[in-house]
Each structure stands twice: as structure tokens, then as C-alpha cells.
Image: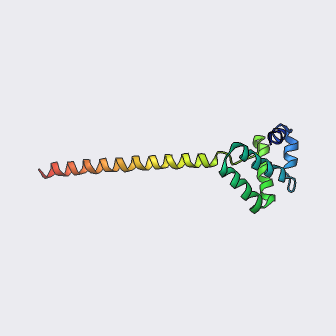
């Protein structure tokens, strides 16, 4: 598995793009699956397998060719689940901070109203 990943990573850019052409793009599907297995990333593995089964290979070929031309790498989904989890946790933190700020503001308003009544 490591030798396949190393071989794919070390290929020249032109060969990587050729391997991204529809029908030859299976090499990149296999690459994604092996890389997800090696990284022990179940989310990436699931997404890679689902892409293999359910997507149009032409669409993925275009995505692969574009990412290869722009970054000389194939887009893998490794770490996507972790990043999504981090973003959700950050969003929850911000929501809690907003709720706490709103509670403090309500207390200040109540205190101000009580002082006006006196």
C-alpha cells in the first residue's frame, strides 16, 4: 500500500493528469481508499467508497484534473470529518458565549429597571 501511494505521489504532473482521465481515474479512487486506510480515517474511507460507487466518473475526473493542475495533489477526504467536528465545536462555543452575553445583558437591564423604579 505504501509503495502505491509513494508511486502515485512521485509521478510527474503530466502522468498524474493522464491518470485522472475518465476510466483511468480508477487509479485515483484506489489511491483515495488506500490513503484513507493508511490514515485510519473511517470518514474519508466511507466518502471515498461512496464516491467510487455513486458518482459520475466524469465529474470526479474533472475534479481530479483541476486539483492536480492547481495544487499537484489529489483531493482526499482525510481529516474532513475532524475539521467538521472542530468547526461544530467552535460554533457551539460561540453560541454559548452569545447566550451568556445575552443573559448578562438581561441581568443588567433588570438591575437598571429596578434602580429606575426606586
User: Looking at the image, is 11 positioned above or below residue 23?
Assistant: above
Give the total number of marks visible in the rendering.
0
Q: In the picture shown, does residue 73 fall above or below 113?
A: above
- Identify the residue at image location x=31%, y=50%: 103
**Residue 71, how many percent across, how many down?**
75, 41
Q: Is residue 52 above or below residue 66?
A: below
The structure residue drawn at horizontal position 78% and vertical position 61%, both measured from the top left corner, is 56
The x and y percentages for residue 21 are 86, 52
Q: Viewed as shown, does residue 110 lie left or right of 27?
A: left
| Residue 39, image quadrant | top right
Position of the N terminus, as image quadrant, is top right
Identify which residue is drawn at 25% across, 50% down: 109
From the viewer's perspective, is 26 left or right of 107? right
Which of the two residues, 107 or 115, is positioned nearer the viewer here? 107
Q: Residue lying furthest left in this view? A: 118
Horizontal arrangement in the rendering, residue 111 relative to residue 45 (left or right)? left
Depth check: give the residue in front, 41 or 101: 41
Residue 54 appears at what percent x and percent y? 75, 62
Colour approach in the figure: rainbow
Q: Viewed as shown, does residue 101 lie left or right of 12?
A: left
Could you tell me residue 36's position as x and y percent?
A: 71, 47
Q: Nearer the viewer, residue 102 or 19?
A: 19
Residue sitting nearer the eye, 1 or 81? 1
Amino acid at each position: 500500500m505504501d509503495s502505491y501511494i509513494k508511486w502515485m505521489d512521485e509521478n510527474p504532473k503530466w502522468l498524474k493528469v493522464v491518470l485522472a482521465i475518465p476510466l483511468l481515474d480508477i487509479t485515483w479512487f484506489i489511491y483515495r481508499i488506500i490513503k484513507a486506510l493508511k490514515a485510519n480515517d473511517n470518514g474519508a474511507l466511507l466518502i471515498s467508497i461512496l464516491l467510487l460507487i455513486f458518482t459520475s466518473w466524469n465529474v470526479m475526473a474533472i475534479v481530479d484534473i483541476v486539483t492536480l493542475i492547481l495544487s499537484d495533489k489529489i483531493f482526499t477526504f482525510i481529516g474532513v470529518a475532524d475539521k467538521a467536528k472542530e468547526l461544530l465545536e467552535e460554533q457551539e462555543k460561540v453560541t454559548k458565549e452569545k447566550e451568556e452575553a445575552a443573559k448578562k445583558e438581561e441581568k443588567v437591564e433588570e438591575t437598571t429597571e429596578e434602580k429606575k423604579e426606586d
